[in-house]
């Protein structure tokens, strides 16, 4: 136990003192402190960007500045000449120019972007609205009835069917946790995996491992590396969570609204699952990384080996984002129980209230069993790798290590 603690402590301090790790931790902490405050800061100092404006040429004579302002968000200035309106956009006086005609419109822009697509929709809605008013007037509908018709807005209610645990409202509050989990797990595995790869290969190439194996069992060395690096990454997550909590409280106090979005209730269960699935995912991948690294004697070989778990990692993240789009897809349920994918997919299902308790329990159990198998296999491969210097282990050597 003393040997395991010594290796764990050494790996934790070595990784935690790494400049890259410290830099990323500082960046995440600053980001966590500033992100919740951005909307309040914008609200306090006004719009941080210049106001968008639009030059409008109305060839129909249907619209007034007030009518246009009800549908189009950029501040409108009316022109009588199309060329003058376009010239105003070219000179930078206005961001857009739009020419309204009886059956449509022409939009003049200098660059494409999402704002252009939004403006197209707004202009379409403007003309459609006028056309509907004309049609209703022809049918003899009076102004009061028209106002009543257009004032109607349907009430939308989302109801999930057949599951007591499902909560439609919770989706909008918890979906952010899914994004955070994917980013944190991806970042942690990439950083931790790269460290394990380089650490193991460096020890082999410098012959340090020869000295270490004489005083410490290979299995304890491997476990110590995984636990030490995992503890450092977990501390990084905790720093980010504490920073977010502090920022939310301080921002709410500055804004003077304790019920503000920044004080939204954070489910303890979700936070618990963040830590649980991060640890399950990291430990499984970490043993995989370390085992592969022990079969290489050069950094180039280690990086090549590391592409295997990296591909699994990327596939898991892609599957998680796809799950957000359609959590009820046929493939989502089975994939959320497959090791190496479950930390991503099952956690997304949990945040979207799409996984019953028994499925969560099965997924966690499957990941724990997988960790036990992978750690046993990794220890065997790691022990075999420590005894081979200069020679690249063959598939036959790896199979013999399990005997």
Image (tube, rainbow, N blue to C red):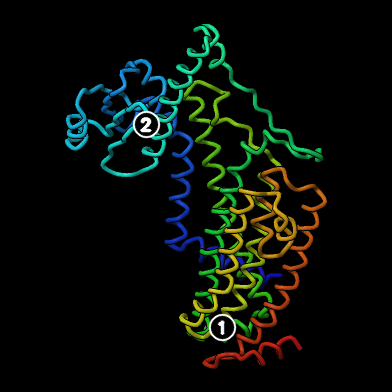
Query: Which residue was labeled with disc 2?
Result: 104
Query: Could you tell whether 289 is left or right of 114 in the image?
Result: right
Q: Which image quarter: residue 196?
A: bottom right
Query: Could you tell whether 46 is left or right of 251 in the image?
Result: left
Classify mark 1: residues with Cα within 10 Å, few (<14), some (14-19) or many (20+): many
Asked if 142 appears above or below 10 in the picture, the reply is above
Which quarter of the rendering shows the C terminus? Answer: bottom right
**What residue is at 47 percent from the left and 46 percent from the top?**
29
Residue 316, given in percent of the width and then of the height, sits at: 61, 61
Q: Nearer the viewer, residue 334 or 330?
A: 330
Q: Earlier in the sequence, mark 2 or mark 1?
A: 2
Q: Helix, strand or loop at disc 1?
A: helix
Q: Nearer the viewer, residue 168 or 8?
A: 168
Q: Nearer the viewer, residue 257 or 217?
A: 257
Q: Nearer the viewer, residue 9 or 342?
A: 342
Q: Are marks 2 and 1 in contact (CB under 8 Å)?
A: no
Q: Which mark is residue 13?
A: none
Tally of numbered discs:
2
Residue 9, given in percent of the width and then of the height, sits at: 59, 65
Q: Which mark is residue 209?
A: 1
Residue 227, given in percent of the width and then of the height, sits at: 64, 65
Asked if 253 appears above or below 32 in the picture, the reply is above
Residue at mark 2 to residue at mark 1: CA–CA distance? 75 Å
**What residue is at 71 percent from the left and 49 percent from the top?**
328
Q: Which image quarter: residue 192?
A: bottom right
Classify mark 2: residues with Cα within 10 Å, few (<14), some (14-19) or many (20+): few
Which quarter of the rendering shows the N terminus? Answer: bottom right
């Amino acid at each position: 136990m003393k040997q395991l603690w010594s290796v764990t402590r050494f790996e934790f301090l070595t990784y935690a003192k790494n400049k890259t790790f410290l830099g990323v931790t500082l960046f995440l902490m600053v980001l966590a402190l500033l992100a919740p405050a951005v909307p309040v800061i914008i609200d306090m100092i006004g719009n941080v960007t210049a106001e968008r404006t639009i030059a409008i040429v109305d060839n129909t004579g249907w619209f007034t500045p007030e009518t246009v302002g009800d549908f189009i968000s950029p501040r409108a200035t009316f022109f009588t000449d199309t060329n003058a309106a376009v010239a105003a956009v070219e000179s930078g006086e206005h961001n857009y120019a739009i020419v309204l005609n009886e059956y449509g419109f022409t939009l003049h822009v200098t660059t494409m972007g999402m704002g252009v697509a939004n403006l197209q929709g707004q202009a379409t809605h403007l003309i459609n609205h006028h056309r509907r008013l004309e049609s209703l007037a022809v049918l003899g509908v009076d102004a009061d009835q028209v106002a009543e018709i257009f004032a109607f807005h349907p009430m939308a209610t989302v109801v999930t069917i057949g599951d007591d645990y499902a909560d439609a409202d919770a989706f909008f509050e918890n979906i952010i946790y899914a994004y955070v989990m994917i980013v944190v797990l991806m970042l942690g595995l990439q950083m931790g995996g790269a460290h394990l790869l380089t650490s193991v290969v460096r020890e082999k190439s410098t012959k340090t491992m020869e000295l270490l194996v004489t005083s410490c069992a290979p299995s304890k060395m491997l476990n110590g590396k995984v636990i030490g690096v995992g503890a450092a990454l977990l501390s990084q997550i905790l720093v980010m969570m504490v920073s977010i909590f502090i920022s939310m409280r301080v921002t709410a106090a500055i804004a003077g609204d304790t019920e503000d979005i920044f004080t939204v209730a954070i489910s303890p269960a979700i936070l618990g699952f963040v830590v649980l699935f991060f640890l399950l995912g990291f430990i499984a991948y970490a043993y995989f990384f370390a085992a592969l690294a022990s079969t290489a004697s050069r950094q180039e070989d280690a990086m090549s080996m590391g592409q295997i778990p990296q591909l699994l990692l990327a596939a898991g993240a892609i599957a998680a984002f796809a799950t957000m789009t359609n959590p009820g897809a046929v493939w989502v349920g089975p994939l959320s129980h497959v090791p190496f994918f479950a930390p991503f997919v099952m956690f997304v299902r949990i945040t979207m209230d799409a996984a019953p308790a028994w499925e969560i329990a099965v997924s966690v159990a499957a990941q724990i069993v997988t960790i036990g198998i992978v750690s046993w296999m990794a220890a065997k491969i790691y022990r075999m790798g420590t005894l081979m210097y200069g020679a690249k282990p063959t598939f036959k050597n790896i199979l013999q290590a399990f005997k």
